[in-house]
């Protein structure tokens, strides 16, 4: 016989109800901290002090200077479903506070010894109420207390030992508490946060009013390397405002451990948000890596439902498509606008503080990029550089275009500006403008372009850089008027499997959009009759095989639309100048100028960096000059 048939239905006691509710609200010490800090923020506090002992199991104390709780409301604050933050349904449909359920204090007091002290006046009598895991009838007593509220939670889970067994080590539990404080510190810059553990100050996040102060706090929480490789963004449209910081694609993570997203000041996890961010980084992030960001989305509280999860970690947007598109466009544009000269040199490992500071120095405008040398040495070096460049061919426009065989033929474009570039580089006029990536000096091992700019040495991976340039031009051409094509005088035959041939038939329209015309010549044979002009020197057979492999893997035409850029990326990779291809000085300078004009040129479409730089100061350190 079922147990449901042997017992009568009865009302639960307040104590048992609160303990059941505590199972949702109070999972561990960090859950207590989250609820108490949210209450302090909602109370308008500008200073919050957090004391922790033994990872929060022995003691959690949160002290704030907010508006406080009146004497008559103290006992009521420990009751379930008691809150000052919502009164009617309209308030629930437009929640503007972090906490609103009215369960936190009641749930905490049911599984711990709780002392709540508060005062609503600067010079007035404070009051205190206690609860220790029993029914919610509590006595209010006077106490000395400044304006604000203090909540002490002692002996967490003292009356539910089974729950205590599920807690981790003291260090692990405190780490979770730190995470909660950090999440709030990254968006509530107008509040001082002080964290003590076992009597020792561990964190002190001071009020941040200016942009520089905010960035210092973000660096405290996320690490200096994050800020050294982050872009500050602020976008507004359609009643939505996005602000915060996103890391450069080259500052990627092996896991999603540096991702903070807030909706109206509330830290949330949302599939719509995650997908929009992932799409924005799709063309620039290395495979298997995760972006890093601290982003705040502000919108009308009535257009987002925060009451969809007991712990308030998830939200539901009224118009999720609008939010998704706004996030994607904003981040996509912010990343696309990063070009040499307005972003730090990308590095494959941005964890070093020193390398980050060096990158920052590279961005600073200076009258002299040779600050560590004497004036005489600087003049000598500049003159020597000008002499070396002047000894290189000083081509006319016609000569430049004749020498662009390898580079320019891959995608026709006007490089008349390169005549001016080379003439300026060949000139001994030190006052001439020097572009961000400088002027080419030499090519190393047929792979890297070496250039000199105002700050020092620039190194460019010519294949990776040209791959990004080709890729962006293909995307732009496809979006504007379709890819320019040319028919082959002699169609090229390719032997494929029947599955690949069937796939080519199925996606013939897709190939047309990509600039290819394929014809079925047999059960296992294809004819290539037309190709994109910009890829006329690439390996057509291998290119078609790679595209077919992508189509077979992605399956349907709907999925192909989503992966169109990946296919273009494959085409761009095959169509880019290869390693061990010798380039002339004009060709290298043309590549540098195109990099400065191309979106996302800091990394190829596989996410690898395309260039890096060493300032004169860094070079001097390598050779111990001046030491």
Image: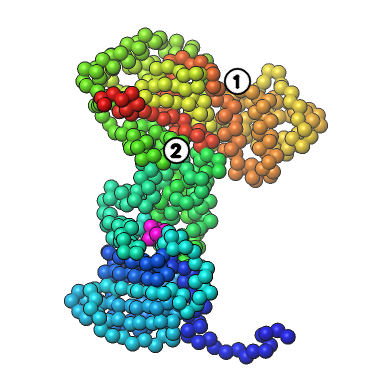
Going 66% across and 43% down the picture, which residue do you hit? 554
Q: Nearer the viewer, residue 320 or 455?
A: 455
For the record, the magenta segment spans: 178-183
For label 1, the SS is: loop
- 1 or 2: mark nearer the eye: 2
Quadrant of the rendering where the N terminus is positioned = bottom right
Give percent across and percent down for residue 382. Answer: 28, 17
| Residue 401 appears anywhere in the view | no
Seen at 27% across and 64% down, the residue is 46
What secondary structure prevails in the magenta region? helix
In percent of width and height, residue 567 lies at 61, 36
Q: In the image, which disc is placed on residue 349?
A: 2
Q: Is residue 427 above or below residue 283?
A: above
User: Which image quarter is the C terminus in?
Assistant: top left
Q: How many labels does the image show?
A: 2
Residue 122 image offset from top left, x and y in percent: 20, 74
Task: State the mark number for residue 537.
Answer: 1
Q: Which residue is drawn at 28% across and 60% down?
A: 192
């Amino acid at each position: 016989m079922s147990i449901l048939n042997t017992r009568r239905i009865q009302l639960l006691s307040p104590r048992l109800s609160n303990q059941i509710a505590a199972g949702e609200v109070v999972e561990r010490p960090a859950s207590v901290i989250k609820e108490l800090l949210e209450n302090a923020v909602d109370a308008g506090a500008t200073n919050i002090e957090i004391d922790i002992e033994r990872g929060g199991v022995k003691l959690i104390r949160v002290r704030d200077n907010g508006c406080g709780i009146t004497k008559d409301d103290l006992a009521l604050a420990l009751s379930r479903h008691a809150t000052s933050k919502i009164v009617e349904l309209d308030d629930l449909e437009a929640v503007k506070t972090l906490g609103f359920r009215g369960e936190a204090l009641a749930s905490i007091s049911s599984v711990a010894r709780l002392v709540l002290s508060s005062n609503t006046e600067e010079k007035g009598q404070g009051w205190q109420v206690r609860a220790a895991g029993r029914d919610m009838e509590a006595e209010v007593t006077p106490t000395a207390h400044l304006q604000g509220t203090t909540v002490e939670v002692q002996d967490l889970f003292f009356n539910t030992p089974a729950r205590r067994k599920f807690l981790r080590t003291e260090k692990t539990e405190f780490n979770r508490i730190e995470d909660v404080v950090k999440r709030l510190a990254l968006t509530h810059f107008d509040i001082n946060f002080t964290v003590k553990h076992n009597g020792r100050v561990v964190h002190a996040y001071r009020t941040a009013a200016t942009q520089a102060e905010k960035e210092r706090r973000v660096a405290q929480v996320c690490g200096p390397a994050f800020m050294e490789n982050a872009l500050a963004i602020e976008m507004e449209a359609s009643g939505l405002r996005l602000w915060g910081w996103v890391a450069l694609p080259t500052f990627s993570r092996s896991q999603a451990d540096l991702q903070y997203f807030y909706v109206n000041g509330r830290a949330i996890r949302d599939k719509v948000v995650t997908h929009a961010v992932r799409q924005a980084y799709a063309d620039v992030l290395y495979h298997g890596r995760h972006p890093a960001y601290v982003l705040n989305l502000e919108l009308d509280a009535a257009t987002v439902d925060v009451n969809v999860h007991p712990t308030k970690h998830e939200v539901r947007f009224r118009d999720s498509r609008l939010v998704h598109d706004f996030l994607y466009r904003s981040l996509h544009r912010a990343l696309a606008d990063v070009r040499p000269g307005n972003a730090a040199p990308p590095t494959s490992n941005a964890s070093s503080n020193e390398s980050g500071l060096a990158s920052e120095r590279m961005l600073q405008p200076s009258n002299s990029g040779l600050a560590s040398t004497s004036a005489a040495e600087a003049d000598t070096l500049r003159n020597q550089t000008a002499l070396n460049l002047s000894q290189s061919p000083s081509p006319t426009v016609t000569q430049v275009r004749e020498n662009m065989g390898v580079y320019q033929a891959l995608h026709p474009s006007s490089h008349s500006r390169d005549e001016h570039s080379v003439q300026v580089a060949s000139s001994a006029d030190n006052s001439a403008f020097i572009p961000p990536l400088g002027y080419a000096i030499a090519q190393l091992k047929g792979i890297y372009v070496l250039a000199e700019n105002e700050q020092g040495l620039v190194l460019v991976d010519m294949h990776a850089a040209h791959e990004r340039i080709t890729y962006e031009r293909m995307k732009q051409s496809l979006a504007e008027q379709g890819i320019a094509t040319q028919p082959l005088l002699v169609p090229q035959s390719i032997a494929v499997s029947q599955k690949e041939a069937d796939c080519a038939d199925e996606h013939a329209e897709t190939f047309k959009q990509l600039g290819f015309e394929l014809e079925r010549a047999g059960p296992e044979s294809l004819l290539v009759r037309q190709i994109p002009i910009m890829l006329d020197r690439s390996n057509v057979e291998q290119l078609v095989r790679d595209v077919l492999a992508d189509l077979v893997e992605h399956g349907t035409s709907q999925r192909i639309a989503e992966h169109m850029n990946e296919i273009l990326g494959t085409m761009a990779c095959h169509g880019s100048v290869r390693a061990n291809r010798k380039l002339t000085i004009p060709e290298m300078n043309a590549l540098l100028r195109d990099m400065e004009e191309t979106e996302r040129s800091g990394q190829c479409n596989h996410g690898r960096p395309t260039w890096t730089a060493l300032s004169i100061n860094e070079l001097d350190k390598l050779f111990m000059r001046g030491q």
